[in-house]
Amino acid sequence: MYMSNKARAIGITAGVAIFVAVALFTMVSSNKPVSEKRSEPTAITESLVIPAEQLGKVFATVAAHVKPAVVSVYSEKMVRVQPQEFPFPFGDDFFGQFFGQPSPQQPKSRSQPKEYRIPQRGMGSGMILDKQGHILTNYHVVSDVNKIKIQLSDKRIFEAEIVGKDPKTDIAVIKITGNVPNNLPSVQLGDSDALEDGHLVIAVGAPFGLTQTVTSGIISAKGRSDVGIAAYEDFLQTDASINPGNSGGPLVNMRGEVIGMNSAIATGGMQFGGEGQFSGVGFAIPANMIKTVLPTLIKGEEVTRGMMGVVIQELNADLAKHFGLSDSKGALVAQVNKDSPAEKAGLKTGDVIVRFEGKEVRDTRQLRNLVAAATPGTSVKVDVIRDGKEQSFTVTIGRMPTEMVAATKPSGKGENRLDELGLSVQTLTPDLARQLDLQGEKGVLISGIEQDSIVSMANLQVGDLIVEVNRQRVTSVAEFLDALGDQDQILLLIRRNGESLFVMLRMR
């Protein structure tokens, strides 16, 4: 029904009058003044304030203790660029027709376009390890650069160089060159295994170039893997604010000990600190993982890793039930390599590894990290479930060949393609071929298959050797990715137990 503005105003006014009348009647009937209905603000007492102030003092004390040993890391790389040629808006022959001379874009004698070298700069964080000027940071902060400089908390700037690097864990050690100050503060690495979900932590670094920034949070989770950042992953997850520039900075407990190195953030896709920004999910390399490689990196030596010589796969509910397990924790041995430390110790295909040197094995990723961190030549106790019964074996850890590339997903387009397939692969090296009794073979070895993926439903297995993709021979991961392309149907020729088998994958 149509109502005029004046009528609407009268209606609203009447409604307000009725509301006010009811409200007054209610207050009068209660025989209490209106003022007595107002609530007074809660008093801030010392008993409420003191605990909060004490916690604040703890954070301030920890930050003051750690900040002097945190540095900003500046890198520079010279890149080649060519100037862009912009076409003249009236056409190339404009100057010739009207002025009788060639246009600026059409010189009389053409020559190769001149290249320019311009600096590409980056920034991260680091932490001083000792009086000699060794600094811990992420490998991705200082990789493939021409120049490195560090700035101390007191603004002093020094040049630095890489002395040790381990791309597989994204860890690097750099060192101040020239005269090293004799008053350098240093951090103390704590025990990351002692952390529990919910423990308070602070992060220090230079997010967005804002040096000496302190943020706080908690440990959100431990043992995060399959993040796709490094070959060996066992990340601490935290909600302490981590942003571009924090990479390489410390994650610190309430005792002022470094229990992790901030490395990446999740922003819908994992970022190394270049594009995304904080969303409440950050990842730090645990201190105990850093400790295993640090002495080697400081010496400038190559990191060696242990190996047992087995192919392992994840357990699911069906497999766990088949092998008589109460849950899906552990790592199923899918293959024992010939003449390997595992075979010599007595391990067999079908064993489920549940403990490694006393540590409970959650999954294949954790076991892989534990074995890699073990010193070659040492003997370790490995507990397995075999035929429903627990048995123990002593394995003498072997040395992983230097050229044996860890199974890791490449970056960019290749990573997306492997994610679609649910597949992890690695190049079959001569040493790996010998261990797997595949001498004379060439191809790409399947080292991991995700549950419920396209590959898992196509009769492929961990340990299969891919020798052709769409009738094209492949001998490396790079060739494998090139051959995959963007096709919806992929024909693989694989080698398994000395026999060849074609497998068709349908992407959609």
Image (cartoon, rainbow, N blue to C red):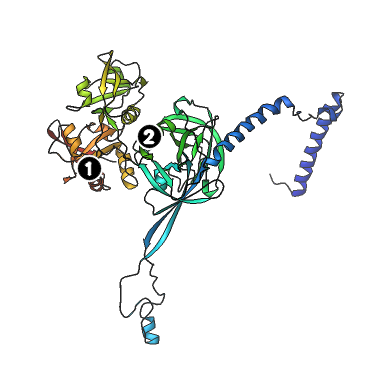
Residue nearer the viewer, 34 or 99: 99
Where in the figure is residue 459, as x and y percent of width and height?
A: 22, 31
Residue 392 image-quadrant placement: top left
Q: Is there a contact, CB below 8 Å, between mark 2 and mark 1?
A: no
- Which is nearer the N-term, disc 2 or disc 1? 2
Q: Is residue 392 above or below residue 85?
A: above
The residue that mark 1 highlights is: 490
Q: Which mark is residue 319?
A: none
Residue beneath the point at 76% across and 28% down: 43
> In the displayed image of the protein, which residue is found farthest to the top?
389
Q: Residues within 10 Å of mark 2 (few under 14, many from 20)?
A: many
Q: Is residue 104 above or below residue 506?
A: below
Where in the figure is residue 359, as x and y percent of width and height?
A: 37, 21
Residue nearer the viewer, 356 or 103: 356
In the visual, does 131 lie left or right of 381? Answer: right
Residue 443 image-quadrant placement: top left
Of the residues shown, which amino acid type is indicated by label 2?
Glu
Where in the figure is residue 149, as x and y percent of width and height?
A: 46, 51
Residue 95 image-quadrant placement: bottom left
Mark pair 2, 1: CA separation: 30 Å
Q: Label 2: state its secondary structure.
A: loop
Query: Is residue 226 visible to the viewer in this orientation of the structure?
Result: no
- The quadrant of the image that shows the C terminus is top left
Of the residues shown, which amino acid type is indicated by label 1?
Ile
The residue that mark 2 highlights is: 233
Where in the figure is residue 77, as x and y percent of width and height?
A: 40, 55
Residue beneath the point at 15% across and 32% down: 437
Q: Label 1: state its secondary structure.
A: strand
- The quadrant of the image that shows the N terminus is top right
User: Which is in the foreground here, disc 2 or disc 1?
Assistant: 2
In the visual, does 87 lie left or right of 473? Answer: right
Q: Residues within 10 Å of mark 1 (few under 14, many from 20)?
A: some
